[in-house]
Image (cartoon, rainbow, N blue to C red):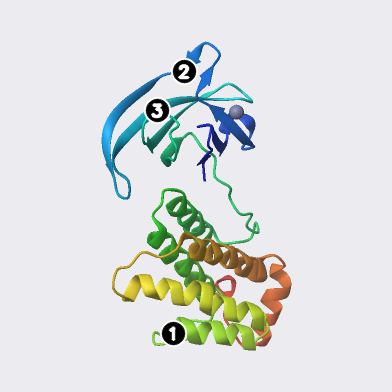
Amino acid sequence: MAEINNEGSIRARCPGCHGALSSFEWRTQLGQFGVITVSHKHRNWGEINLDYRLFRCAGCGRGGLGVVAYPGQFPGAYRDLYSFFPEVHDRLKLPKTVPEGIGKEFREGETCLDSGAIRAAAGMFRSVLDKTLRANGYKEKNGTTLEQQIDAAAKDGVITEARKRRAHDEIRVLGNDVLHDKWQPIPVEDVEASRHYAQRILEDFYDDRDSVLKLLRSAGRVPDEDKLE
Ligand SMILES: [Zn+2]
């Protein structure tokens, strides 16, 4: 996520610098690049300024647009960066054998996370877990819960006990809160953890697919590979 420092520079991953972390500056010795300032009511600080401000990457020179709230003169005594464009977000690596639909679900979770749709992201990562277990033959019948499927995968030895706990605590329970409980904000860190463990579970199932298939078959599971179209 892009961050703004006390001097008003923005640190973000720059698409022109192959995704490297770069500093975007808002002025040279000749002056600032350009800005539109409007008055704005901040949720904590009341009536302050809001800038739509041009920045320039110190590495490759490409332009960027930041939306920043602050009091007085930019960059102000304190400030709040609402958004910054363009920014490259990191993408976790997934095994090549992950089924296309599951991979896309995972990427959509990351896109939700990037755009601040935190609850939606939690729902997506829970769905990744759900679809992965289903694709590996753990949804035995309609009533088999996600909880039972996770436990069964650990019992078969496809995931470790430690991973089983993470799958419950970091992915399933968080996703269930979103899907079934009253609306409330959830911390972005919790969803970052959910993303991390969803990736690890995809690695458990798909990094060494041949060994996992053997394990699944010997446990009597019917993974998607063995199902007739
Ligand atoms: Zn750059």
- Figure quadrant of residue 120: bottom left
**Viewer-closest of 184 and 43:** 43
Relative to 161, residue 192 above or below: above
At 58% across and 50% down in the image, what residue appears?
91
- Asked whether disc 1 touches disc 3, contact meaning CB atoms under 8 Å apart, the reply is no
Residue underneath mark 2? 32
| Crowd around label 2: few <14 · some 14–19 · many ≥20 (10 Å) | few
182 or 133, nearer to the observer: 182
The secondary structure type at the circle numbered 2 is strand
Question: Which amino acid does the dot numbered 3 rest on?
Answer: Gln
Report, in whole angstroms, how far the alpha carbon at label 2 lies from the one at label 1: 58 Å
Q: Give the secondary structure at mark 3.
A: loop
Q: Tell me which numbered mark, 2 or 3, is placed earlier along the sequence.
A: 2
CA neighbours of label 3 inside 10 A, class few (<14), some (14 to 19), many (20+): few
Q: Which mark is residue 73?
A: 3
Q: Is residue 113 visible?
A: yes
In percent of width and height, residue 201 lies at 61, 70
Numbered label attached to residue 37: none
- Residue at 46 percent across and 81 percent down: it is 146
| Residue at figure coordinates x 34%, y 72% from the top left | 179
Say if residue 228 shows up in the picture: no
Q: Residue at x 53, y 71 (%)?
A: 132
> Does the closest atom of ligand 1 sit within 8 Å of the Cβ of label 2?
no
**Nearest-to-viewer mark from 2 and 1:** 2
Horizontal side of residue 208 vs 179, given as left or right: right
| Residue indicated by mark 1 | 145
Give the residue type that dot 1 points to.
Thr
Between the C-alphas of marks 1 and 3, the distance is 56 Å
In this rendering, the answer to whether 35 lies above or below 97 is above
Q: Nearer the viewer, mark 1 or mark 3?
A: 3
x and y, in percent, of residue 42 in the image:
30, 44
